[in-house]
Amino acid sequence: MASRKLKIGIIGAGGFAAQHMEAFAEIPEVEVVAFMRRSEGPLREMQEQWDVPKGYTDHREMLDDPDIDAIDIITPTDSHKQYALDTIASGRPVLCEKPLALNAVDCQDMLNAAQTAGVIHAVNFNQRGRTPVGRMKRYIDAGYVGDIYHVNIRWGFSSQQDTRPDVPSWRYLPEHGGGTVYELIHVFDMARFLNGEVARVSSVLNTAEKHRKFIDAPDGFDVEVPDSSAFLLEYVNGAYAVIHTSFVQRGEPLRRGVTVDVGGSKGRIVSNGLFGLLGTSGENAALAELDPGPPYPQPYEQFVAGALAGDQSLIDTGFEAGLEAARIVDAIHKSWAERRWVDVER
């Protein structure tokens, strides 16, 4: 791109936009120049809060603005596909919040459209950088654990009524949050990132609290998504992963509830808090602290670099990553519905 900075327009200037704005603020090559939100009052408030000059209540008007170089989509999951397809049709690079879409078929359509148009694309699987997983991957790639035998991932925290009365209802709606399968889809991206593609899955999906109240639904409603889940994944290379996700696990704040443990032929590496690592390699010695190394690059950084250079290879979490995670999720739902192992279809 000829411009010195990548001028970004954000579709979906709601609560999650703050996280994106903070990330972009740390990237000198970025300028967020426009917000889109359907409600004009909240839109103007967001513009004032973040000093963003342009505001739109219709994304099509935003896409008609020639001063916007790229688009960041931060809307409910069921709207991702249309916003992404419209952005791709405009020829602009697109960063989309996770999950990419509600099923693998829609994800495939989005990927096909981006590839056909030659548009730069990325999914915001930011937990590779916000947890120790990216730093662990560096050790794994260097041969620290040898051939991977097993991966254990746990992400648990409490969203129960008495501990988090501020939880909005969208987190428990199938088309928006999707419970502990789709909202925490990061765990499947982590599993793939650490050890490659998944061949088949077996799952248990449980709704422990079948009715609950929300800050925006004080009368509450019957919950139709799992609030606790367990997954067994068999990798193509024969290793396996055990994953547990929960909204009803007490005693852990939101992100500190993520733990990852990878064992192999030569060693073992384990997350230690938000950024630390423990490990052992070679001799069967006790786990000891490891130098975690520098932060792993976030999708925001990679997206900006890829968009400015016109180079998709600079982005680890392209739409392909969103598609592969969705394929796992599709298999997980089928596994639970049919109470059996299910192959991940590709």
Image (spheres, rainbow, N blue to C red):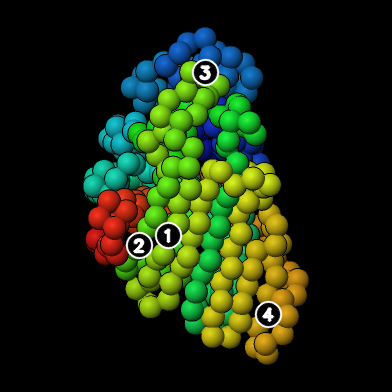
Q: Are marks 4 and 2 in contact (CB under 8 Å)?
A: no
Q: Which residue is mark 4?
A: 280
Give residue 339's position: percent from left, percent from top.
Answer: 29, 58
Q: How many marks?
A: 4
Q: Which residue is mark 2?
A: 202
Residue 81 at what x, y percent from top left? 31, 36
Closer to the chain start, of discs 4 and 2, is 2
Q: Is residue 232 left or right of residue 16?
A: left
Q: Residues within 10 Å of mark 2 (few under 14, many from 20)?
A: many
- Residue nearer the viewer, 199 or 89: 199
Labels 1, 4: front one: 1
Q: Residue furthest top?
A: 41
Q: Residue furthest right?
A: 289
129 is higher (above) or lower (below) than 174:
below
Q: Nearer the viewer, mark 3 or mark 4?
A: 3
Q: CA distance from mark 1 to mark 2?
A: 6 Å
Q: Is residue 183 above or below residue 153?
A: above
Q: Is residue 233 above or below residue 288?
A: above
Mark 3 vs mark 4: which is more N-terminal? 3
Q: Residues within 10 Å of mark 1 (few under 14, many from 20)?
A: many
Amino acid type at mark 4: Thr
Visible residue check, residue 115: no
Q: Which residue is mark 3?
A: 218
Image coordinates for residue 130, horizontal then vertical, percent: 61, 51
Q: Is residue 274 above or below residue 43?
A: below
Task: Kindly identify which residue carries mark 1.
Answer: 231
Identify the residue at image location x=52%, y=24%.
214
**Is label 1 in a helix, a strand or a loop?**
strand
